[in-house]
Image (cartoon, rainbow, N blue to C red):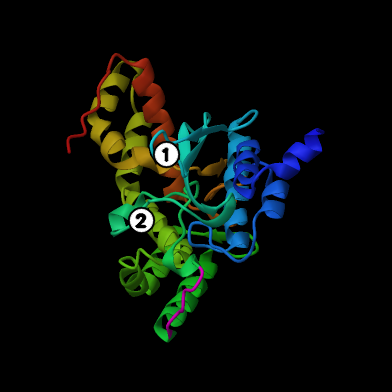
């Protein structure tokens, strides 16, 4: 019997699991059918999600096949494991003699907190991404408003904004955010919801820029022997208030005096207030790491 004949005799379930392990999207596309749901979503949406996850694995350095495991007690439950992510993906498969009837997992999202734990790397679809979802007129209006607000900042071309622009955008769309924030089950609202949340977080840090500028002026006037005292004095400002500014994937373009929101975004920040915080963080961290001080003073 040839290897091709062996493959032909494999069930749809086995072929699917092996294709998942091999991260073979072409095979997955050929194996799956359109008439069942995959984690509640359509075949196309499921494959798009897997394509994104597999690509992220590759970018993170995943080599070879993913480990495929079967639950010891529940024989219809399988896991694929990525070592670079240290993460398992659970697949519960309903079948009839090896033919797929339904593919899902047991993950539940029952609150905003639950939803905020879901990342793009998770196999979970929002209620409005699933087969059979029937949007109401109110939902469609809200979705349109969210897309419009999102596209005011995230355009198809470079959009350079200042802290004043950010303030105006936040003020304009606060009521919309307050309305959609609790609607955790609708994932198509997430682009706006997440952008508003992060932009607001940055803006709150920018409110420290006046104090940061004072700190930079004090540093400029410091003698070498006074630098440790400067670190002590501004310890809380850094550890409690500005440190997080560069914890997210900002791309700082010193030459162009602008800061890209992330490597996929067309949003760029500009202004002395942004760069004052960047400069303060760099100076403080360098001084802190080379000084005799070895603890922060940020109490919660």
- Horizontal and vertical percent position of residue 117: 36, 49
Q: CA distance from mark 2 to mark 1?
A: 22 Å
Determine which of the numbered discs, if any, sits on residue 115 in the image. Answer: 2
The one of 46 and 145 positioned closer to us in this rendering: 46
Q: Quadrant of residue 172?
A: bottom left
| Numbered circles on residues, count | 2
Specify few, some or many for label 1: CA neighbours under 10 Å numbering under 14, 14-19, or 20 or more: few
- Under circle 2, the secondary element is helix
Q: Residue furthest left?
A: 299
Residue range (magenta): 131-136
Prevailing secondary structure class for the magenta stretch in the rendered image: loop
The one of 13 and 154 positioned closer to us in this rendering: 13
- Quarter containing the N terminus: top right
- Under circle 1, the secondary element is loop
The one of 250 and 178 positioned closer to us in this rendering: 178
Pointer 2 or 1: first along the chain: 2
- Horizontal and vertical percent position of residue 289: 37, 19
Q: Does the CB distance between marks 2 and 1 fall below 8 Å? A: no
Taking the magenta stretch, the answer to whether it contains residue 227 is no
Report the side of 14 relative to 192 (left or right). Answer: right
Q: What residue lies at 52% left-to-right and 29% top-to-bottom?
A: 83
Q: What residue lies at 39% left-to-right and 64% top-to-bottom?
A: 167
Q: What residue lies at 56% left-to-right and 59% top-to-bottom?
A: 160
Report the side of 240 relative to 8 (left or right). Answer: left
Q: Is residue 263 visible?
A: no
- Horizontal and vertical percent position of residue 253: 58, 43
Q: Is residue 45 above or below residue 4?
A: below
Specify few, some or many for label 2: CA neighbours under 10 Å numbering under 14, 14-19, or 20 or more: some
Q: Which residue is disc 1 drawn over? A: 247
Q: What residue lies at 61% left-to-right and 42% top-to-bottom?
A: 14
């Amino acid at each position: 019997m040839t290897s091709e004949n062996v493959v032909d005799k494999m069930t749809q379930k086995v072929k699917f699991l092996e294709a998942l392990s091999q991260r073979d999207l072409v095979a997955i596309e050929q194996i799956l059918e359109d008439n069942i749901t995959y984690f509640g979503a359509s075949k196309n949406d499921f494959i798009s999600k897997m394509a994104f996850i597999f690509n992220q694995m590759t970018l993170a350095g995943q080599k070879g096949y993913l480990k495929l495991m079967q639950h010891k007690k529940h024989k219809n439950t399988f896991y694929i494991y990525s070592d670079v992510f240290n993460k398992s993906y659970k697949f519960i498969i309903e079948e009839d003699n090896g033919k797929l009837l339904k593919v899902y997992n047991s993950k539940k999202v029952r609150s905003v907190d639950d939803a905020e734990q879901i990342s793009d790397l998770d196999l979970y679809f929002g209620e409005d991404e699933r087969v059979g979802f029937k949007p109401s007129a109110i939902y469609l209006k809200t979705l349109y408003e969210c897309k419009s607000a999102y596209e005011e900042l995230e355009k198809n071309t470079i959009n350079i904004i200042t802290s004043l622009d950010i303030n105006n955008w936040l003020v304009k769309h606060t009521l919309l955010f307050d309305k959609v924030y609790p609607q955790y089950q609708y994932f198509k609202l997430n682009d706006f919801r997440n952008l508003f949340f992060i932009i607001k977080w940055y803006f709150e840090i920018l409110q420290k820029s006046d104090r940061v500028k004072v700190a930079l002026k004090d540093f400029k006037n410091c003698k070498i022997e006074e630098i440790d005292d400067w670190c002590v004095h501004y310890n809380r400002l850094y550890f409690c208030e500005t440190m997080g500014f560069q914890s997210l994937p900002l791309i700082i373009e010193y030459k162009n005096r602008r800061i890209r929101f992330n490597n996929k975004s067309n949003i760029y920040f500009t202004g002395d207030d942004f760069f004052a915080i960047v400069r303060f963080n760099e100076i403080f961290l360098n001084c802190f790491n080379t000084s005799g001080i070895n603890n922060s003073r940020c109490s919660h």
